[in-house]
Image: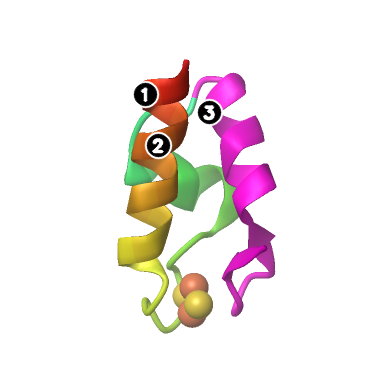
Amino acid sequence: MYVCLCEGVTDKEIEKAVDQGARTMRDLRRNLCVGSQCGKCTCHARDVLHEALQAR
Ligand code: FES
């Protein structure tokens, strides 16, 4: 499912980024550009990030 429509980033891509070492929203923004346009996805992206971190 798409999390960030502006950058076309899915929840699976965020989970993959976590597998590759992403730990913060700053990491996601740097790696995937999540939230770098309109910013509406930031809360959802943070939830997906935290769920992925807890699952690791
Ligand atoms: Fe992510 Fe707009 S939906 S920056």
Q: Amino acid at mark 1?
A: Gln
Counting the numbered discs, the total is 3
Quarter-wise, where is residue 10 in the image? bottom right
Neighbour class for label 1 at 10 Å: few (<14), some, many (≥20)?
few
Whole-percent x and y of residue 28? 47, 45
Quarter-wise, where is residue 7 in the image? bottom right
Position above or below: 27 against 2: above
Q: Which residue is mark 2?
A: 51
Neighbour class for label 2 at 10 Å: few (<14), some, many (≥20)?
few
User: Residue at 65% of width from left, 61% of height from top?
Assistant: 9
Q: Which residue is mark 3?
A: 18
Q: Amino acid at mark 3?
A: Val
- Residue segment shown in magenta: 1-21
User: Residue at 45% of width from left, 69% of height from top?
Assistant: 36
Going by the image, does 12 lie left or right of 46?
A: right
- For the residues labelled 3 and 1, the Cα–Cα distance comes to 10 Å
- For the residues labelled 1 and 2, the Cα–Cα distance comes to 5 Å
Q: Does the magenta segment cover residue 5?
A: yes
Whole-percent x and y of residue 5? 61, 77
- Render colour scheme: rainbow
Please say if the residues under marks 1 and 2 sit with CB atoms less than 8 Å apart. yes
Image disc number at residue 26? none
Neighbour class for label 3 at 10 Å: few (<14), some, many (≥20)?
some
